[in-house]
Amino acid sequence: MRVKTVAWLSRESAGRLMLLAVLGICGGILAYSIARIVLFQTERSELEHSAQISVENAGRLGAESFAAMEAVAKDGLPLCSDREIAFMRNLVFNSLHIRDVGRSRDGKVDCSAGVGRVSSPARIGPPDIAIRGVQFWTSTGLMISSEAHGFVLERDGVSVVLNPETFKTMEEPPPRYVTGFLYDRSRDLMVRRSGNVIPLNKEEIAAGRFVERQGVYYQPLCPERSMACMVAYEARTDFLAKIRPVSVAWALAGVLTGMLLGFMIIFAALRRRTMESQLRRAIRRGGLDLAYQPIVDLDSGMMAGVEALARWSNDDGEPVAPDVFVPLAESKGFVTEITRSVMRCAIKDLGDLLVDGDLRMSVNITAQDLMDPGFLAELERCVSAAGILPGAIGLELTERSMVDYGAATEALAQLKVAGYRVYIDDFGTGYSSLAYLHRLGVDALKIDQAFTQTIGTGAVTASVVPQILDMARQLDLLVVVEGIETEEQAEYFRQSKAGSLGQGWLFGRALPVEEIRKLIQQRSSMRHYESLAGTANRG
Ligand code: C2E
Ligand code: MG
Ligand code: MG
């Protein structure tokens, strides 16, 4: 026996450990994957940002160069005169990036700020590219003199030499790099202007798509109106090295979250089991209480019956709603014990008041009670011991619990033959047709409070109520309306002439046995439910 307990415990613990491990691993994998995707995108947009900054820098540099060229072209001074050379020197002194400005004709430099007048001008050769009237020489070794070589632009007979260092400052520090290109869209020509040689073709650069090539991530940027295209890039290993620690941190957080979820599930299960054992113990020790709610005749306002409702407080003294503990007992297969206990108590509490037969008491039952072979015999024993007629007992079966119609039909037929009344509780929340319930021999319908509460609200469900009432009348089924809380709702059902009974807070809440006994004993003197509500409507 001891061995068995230990084995059970260890199986249980193994199950819990397994749950924690699975949820932890799943949480970790999920968080890691999400983090990788998010961080990858972030890093990628960082690369794009680098390319963007370089494009903007190139734009500024271009604007400064064009302004210098325009100033010289329009200086109105004699070509290559001392005054013009002085003017050009002034431009160079005032610029950070321009190394030299000169006058040039047919690719030959006549004079410049750096070298003055050139007696026999050297040809600097054909440009590498010409875009919108500007010629560019990208190789830095070709220029005017050894002091003034660099990146050259020429327009309208004026050339500008840019400091090659300028482009280096445009490149991001490692591990990110930028390679710049000049792009003539009209002729679809592209030349590298600065930076390292990269293995991307013109189309790929112009398209601006993120690509991975030979272990390096490349992000090109080629704005429509710009002459420059920039490609920012970073080695895959550097790229991933940055996101790995954060991804791992996320993965750990995922593991912890998954395990926390596991602990919560285990805790809930343990709590549920504790609740289950507390409930079983309470039933065994007669710890269930009963409350009785009046059911009134809507026309006369007289109390026509009561419904017995189970009440239970757990070991900490906290009340647990029947909507919680009844389904728990149902799912664990011991709800029949609740029904039997309620039945015995209720008949003990109010049996003497049911003897003369003009008051009816309802008890809630479930599909499991119908399947219980000893149920009817136990009921018969209680009823005959109290000397009451079976017709004074109503058995309320929720519509939802009638899962096995075949078996239910037989059990209901036996109850009917024995003289008990059968009510379908919470009608409208399941899917049974009224005609079918009628064939089952059901005596009454309890219209679910969800329908009652929509009366006067214009909700769609409210429109179903007249149809239910009509059908019930045609099939000669008694109607009990649940959850009547307002006079308007009571009046609606009174006007419907369905001969209905009503139950709800308007008439009275569920009361302890002593109070309901007092009400029942007083009821012969009451003509209208208001007087009933006046005393019963508490809590
Ligand atoms: P039910 O059988 O439909 O009982 C009516 C429920 O509606 C009761 O809730 C009652 O207190 C509540 N109620 C009555 N009038 C009003 C009203 O005007 N407004 C509102 N909002 N509610 C009203 P309670 O006692 O919490 O029971 C809930 C459900 O638990 C019951 O619904 C029944 O299905 C189940 N139950 C209670 N006692 C037993 C029992 O002994 N055995 C079984 N099998 N089920 C039970
Ligand atoms: Mg009920
Ligand atoms: Mg109900």
Image: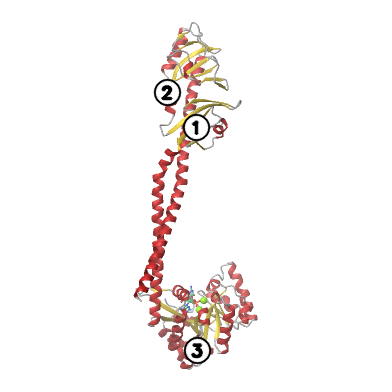
Give the mark nearest the N terminus, 1 or 3: 1
Q: Which of 377 and 462 is in front in this view?
A: 377
The percent position of residue 210, horizontal first and vertical second, equals 52, 38
Above or below 168: residue 114 = above
Residue 50 showing in the rendered view = yes
User: Which secondary structure lies at badge 3?
Assistant: helix
Per the model, the C-alpha gap separating discs 1 and 3 is: 88 Å
Q: Quadrant of the N terminus?
A: bottom left
Q: Viewer-proximal residue, 31 or 500?
A: 31
The amino acid beneath tag 3 is Ala
Which residue occupies the extreme right position in the image?
Answer: 474
Q: Mark 1 points at which residue?
A: 231
Secondary structure category for the residue under label 2: helix
Q: Mark 3 points at which residue?
A: 377
Badge 2: residue crowd in 10 Å (few <14, some 14–19, many ≥20): few
Residue type at mark 1: give it.
Val
Identify the disc placed on residue 165: 2
Amino acid carrying mark 2 in the image: Glu
Using the rendered view, name the quadrant where residue 444 is placed: bottom right
